[in-house]
Amino acid sequence: MAFVGTVLGYQSDKAVWKYFLRHWAAGFPSLGDRSTFVRQLANLGHIEAFLHQHWARTLEAFAAKVHLVDGFPVPVCHPRRVGRRTLFRGEAGWGFCASKDEHYFGFHGLVLTTADGIITGVASRAAHIDERDALFDLPLEYSRGALFGNKGFIRPILTEDLSAMGMTLHSPLRRNMMDSRPKSLVDHIVSVRRRVETVIGQLAERFSAERTGARMLWQLVSRIYRKVAAHPLCVLLNQSLGRPLLDFEGLVTE
């Protein structure tokens, strides 16, 4: 139910419950009341994590030799309300979203994908924490080969640490840095990285990953993971139907 509701674009557990009550009550006679439904969903985090891993393995994503990493903002309130807000106090932080050119208060989500756009890992931390440090919250033990990141991942010690794990970090360099790499390689990095940017866009627009409606940290983490895990499910459905892997339009309808 949770994944279906997420794929359909419902942003809250309450909205998912209303959808099934309205359209599928006969098929789920034990659906129960809203509060019970919400509590039950909240306890399914470990099952959602297991399903995500299962779907990724089915798609042979962990055997990929190229992985991409990027992040997305998860604001918890409007910046003007931060001073009056008590939720997530001491847990959330201030961050900056370069793609939107704006500061926000909340958390930062990080996803790891294959070059085909299959998500193999997700992590979240307070927005003020450097995403280079958050990188090791991802399941990198399943990844080998090349890792394509953006300029924000440039750090010599990070390159060394990843190399020791069997991964080679590639990213565009900043303007004030000399780049001795062939232009064809740099262009390839930029081109391949567009795939993870596409995935981030789908998470934000189709699965509302940036809006969780959570009031507690464990709830926020659970909902982010559910929204992210729904993505490889859609990829798997597309594969079984012979459709383009990242074409989710019309895949699931009400």
Image (cartoon, rainbow, N blue to C red):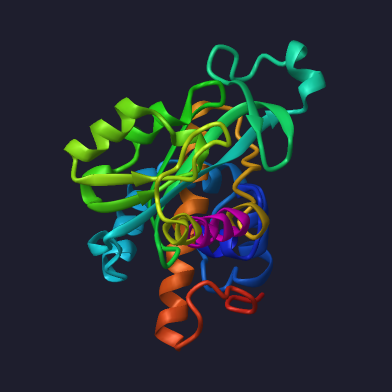
User: Which residue is depicted at the point 50% across and 81% down?
Assistant: 244
Query: Residue 192: image x %, image y %?
Result: 47, 61
Most prominent secondary structure in the magenta stretch? Answer: helix
Query: Residue 181: image x %, image y %?
Result: 40, 50
- The quarter of the picture where residue 158 lies is top left
- Along the horizontal axis of the image, is 155 left or right of 211? left
Query: Over which residues does the magenta segment extend?
Result: 190-202
User: Which residue is depicted at the point 69% across and 27% down?
Assistant: 104
Is the residue 252 above or below the residue 108 in the image?
Answer: below
Q: Tell me, yes or no, if residue 82 can be seen here.
A: yes
- Along the horizontal axis of the image, is 84 left or right of 225? right
Of residues 57 and 113, which is closer to you in this image?
113
Is the residue 226 above or below the residue 179 in the image?
Answer: below
User: Which residue is depicted at the point 51% across and 34% down?
Assistant: 152
- The quarter of the picture where residue 46 lies is top left
Is the residue 226 above or below the residue 84 in the image?
Answer: below
- Residue that sits furthest to the bottom in the current view: 242
Of residues 118 and 186, which is closer to you in this image?
186
Residue 199 magenta-drawn? yes
Residue 153 magenta-drawn? no
Is the residue 232 above or below the residue 180 in the image?
Answer: below
Q: Tell me, yes or no, if residue 1 can be seen here.
A: no
- The quarter of the picture where residue 141 lies is top left
* Quarter placement of the C terminus: bottom right
Query: Residue 142: image x %, image y %?
Result: 22, 50
Of residues 10 and 238, which is closer to you in this image?
238
Query: Residue 197: image x %, image y %?
Result: 56, 55
Give the tally of numbered discs. 0
Of residues 85 and 102, which is closer to you in this image?
102
